[in-house]
């Protein structure tokens, strides 16, 4: 009988030790975050590659800060991948080569619907948020003779990297004004190359569509007498009847030394993810994104136009369940 009681006691003690060990593990996990351990648990994915754009553009500057934040928060390998921007970024997600991307809403809309350069609709893209507006910045030199949009006809124009979001909306705006690529001399140049081309007199004008200010254009304005070409709000409204992602906005005065605000067209940017990412991972990535808006703003002022309140306005792709879960908590 004594031996039986001793055995029961030893089993009970062992069970208590196991429970204590389990309890201790939970306490350590919870204590790591201060909010139930959500962030300290890490991600199911060990890699979070963020496709951006050219090295000098807001996408890459903001994306680099975001990747650093993800790496520090979750201990994952998060990095940016410089690309030709929106079209390439969408295709990289479709090919399962990246997890997240900054893109323009017009390109995402076309990819989801299977229009323009996309031969069939895709269900690989989910959206986390609508971000900040990308302003169409049409720049020329003060002595070029180009004063209106119609003056672009017959000129040598940089329209962005081929198949980039810049090129897609440049082509759309040109066509909306009755100008095709047959009516101009086209150069496929990114931001920095376009600025160099204007400085060297090799091109007459350039489309640089991005958040404000564009670093390449800002630098150019400090060494060259430039002119920003306006886009009539009535023309933007007319084009938006078929391309609803266009809105009429103004480049504020003194952005590039311009004395007055410049009317132009704008397109909202989108933060998208691979639709196959887990709900938990995307929930954490979304949460961390919005909790670190201040550091993103410090990296580039375009991020100051990102807000939680407007993040679900103008979505052009299905909202990922993980992002939806985060929004439902706010």
Image (cartoon, grey):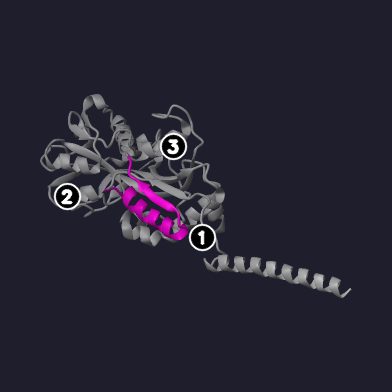
State which tag comes first along the sequence, 1 or 3: 1
Dot 2, how many residues are within 10 Å of its Cα: few (below 14), some (14-19), or many (20+)? Answer: many
Residue placed farthest to the front in the image?
A: 3
Q: Kindly identify which residue carries mark 2.
A: 221
Q: Position of residue 210 (x, y in %)?
A: 30, 46
Nearer-the-camera pick, 24 or 40: 24
Residue at the (54%, 50%) spot, across then down: 322
Q: Which contiguous range is marked in magenta?
A: 56-83
Q: Position of residue 137 (x, y in %)?
A: 26, 43
Residue at the (51%, 36%) spot, across then down: 123
Q: Position of residue 38 (x, y in %)?
A: 54, 60
Alpha-carbon distance for marks 3 and 2?
33 Å
Query: SS of the residue at dot 3?
Result: helix
State which tag comes first along the sequence, 2 or 1: 1
Residue placed farthest to the right in the image?
A: 1
Magenta-drawn stretch contains 40: no
Nearer-the-camera pick, 161 or 209: 161
Q: Is residue 96 visible?
A: yes
Dot 3, how many residues are within 10 Å of its Cα: few (below 14), some (14-19), or many (20+)? Answer: some
């Amino acid at each position: 009988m004594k031996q039986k009681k001793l055995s029961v006691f030893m089993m009970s003690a062992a069970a208590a030790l196991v429970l204590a060990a389990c309890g201790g593990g939970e306490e350590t996990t919870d204590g790591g975050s201060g909010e139930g351990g959500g962030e300290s648990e890490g991600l199911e994915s060990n890699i979070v590659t963020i496709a951006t754009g050219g090295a000098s553009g807001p996408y890459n500057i903001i994306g680099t800060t975001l990747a650093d934040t993800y790496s520090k928060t979750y201990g994952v390998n998060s990095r940016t991948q410089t690309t030709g921007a929106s079209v390439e970024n969408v295709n990289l997600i479709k090919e399962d080569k990246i997890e997240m991307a900054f893109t323009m809403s017009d390109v995402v809309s076309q990819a989801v619907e299977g229009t323009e350069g996309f031969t069939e609709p895709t269900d690989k893209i989910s959206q986390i948020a609508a971000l900040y507006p990308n302003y169409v910045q049409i720049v020329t030199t003060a002595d070029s003779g180009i004063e209106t949009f119609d003056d672009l006809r017959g000129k040598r124009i940089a329209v962005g990297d081929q198949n980039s979001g810049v090129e897609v909306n440049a082509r759309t705006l040109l066509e909306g004004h009755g100008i095709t690529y047959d009516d101009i001399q086209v150069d496929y140049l990114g931001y920095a190359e376009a600025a160099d081309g204007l400085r060297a007199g090799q091109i007459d004008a350039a489309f640089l569509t991005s958040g404000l200010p564009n670093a390449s254009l800002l630098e150019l304005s400090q060494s060259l007498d430039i002119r920003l070409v306006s886009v009539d709000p009535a023309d933007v409204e007319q084009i938006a009847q078929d391309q609803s992602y266009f809105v009429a906005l103004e480049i504020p005065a003194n952005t590039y030394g311009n004395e007055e605000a410049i009317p132009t067209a704008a397109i909202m940017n989108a933060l998208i993810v691979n639709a196959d990412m887990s709900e938990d991972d995307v929930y954490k990535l979304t949460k961390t994104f919005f909790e670190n808006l201040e550091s993103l703003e410090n990296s580039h002022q375009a991020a100051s136009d990102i807000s939680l309140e407007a993040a679900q306005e103008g979505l052009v792709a299905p909202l990922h369940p993980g992002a939806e879960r985060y929004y439902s908590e706010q």
